[in-house]
Amino acid sequence: MDARTIACHLEPRERKLLAAALRELHEAKKLGTKKGSLSRKQMKKLFIVNATPFVGFGILDNMIMIFAGEYIDQMSKGNLPASVSQ
């Protein structure tokens, strides 16, 4: 099978996606970037996407622990003084 035969069997949307991927590959080869290497902008986006859930979880976890600690202190009515500040 050659490339034309494969392209004939693709839907118009699939052809556009294939053309865009080929253009990106051609541009990457022109710029001399290796396959799999990321640009600085891509690395920044990747960092933000991966770091955001960790920051969000950290804030939420901290808030839950503070509220749970306060609740436990109030429910024990001072019988279990686990907190340093009173």
Image (cartoon, rainbow, N blue to C red):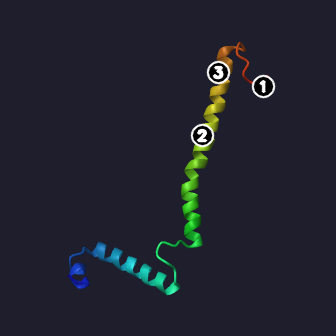
Residue 84: % across, % down: 78, 25
Point 30% across, 73% down: residue: 14
Q: Left or right: where does residue 4 sit relative to residue 72? A: left
**Amino acid at the residue labelled 2:** Leu
**Amino acid at the residue labelled 1:** Val
Which mark's residue is nearer the viewer, 1 or 2?
1
Point 71% across, 12% down: residue: 79
Q: Left or right: where does residue 22 sit relative to residue 47? A: left
Circle 2 Cα neighbour tier, 10 Å, few/some/many (<14 / 14–19 / ≥20): few
Mark number displayed over residue 72: 3
Earlier in the chain: of badge 1 and badge 2, it is: 2
Q: Left or right: where does residue 10 sit relative to residue 26? A: left
Mark number displayed over residue 84: 1
Earlier in the chain: of badge 3 and badge 1, it is: 3
Check disc 3 and report its element: helix, strand or loop: helix
- When asked about the image quadrant of residue 39, the answer is bottom right
Q: Left or right: where does residue 35 sit relative to residue 77? A: left
Q: Distance between the residues labelled 1 and 2?
A: 23 Å
Mark number displayed over residue 74: none
Residue 54: % across, % down: 58, 48
**Amino acid at the residue labelled 3:** Ile
Mark number displayed over residue 60: 2
Earlier in the chain: of badge 3 and badge 2, it is: 2
Check disc 1 and report its element: helix, strand or loop: loop
Which mark's residue is nearer the viewer, 3 or 1?
1
User: On screen, 19 above or below 50?
Assistant: below
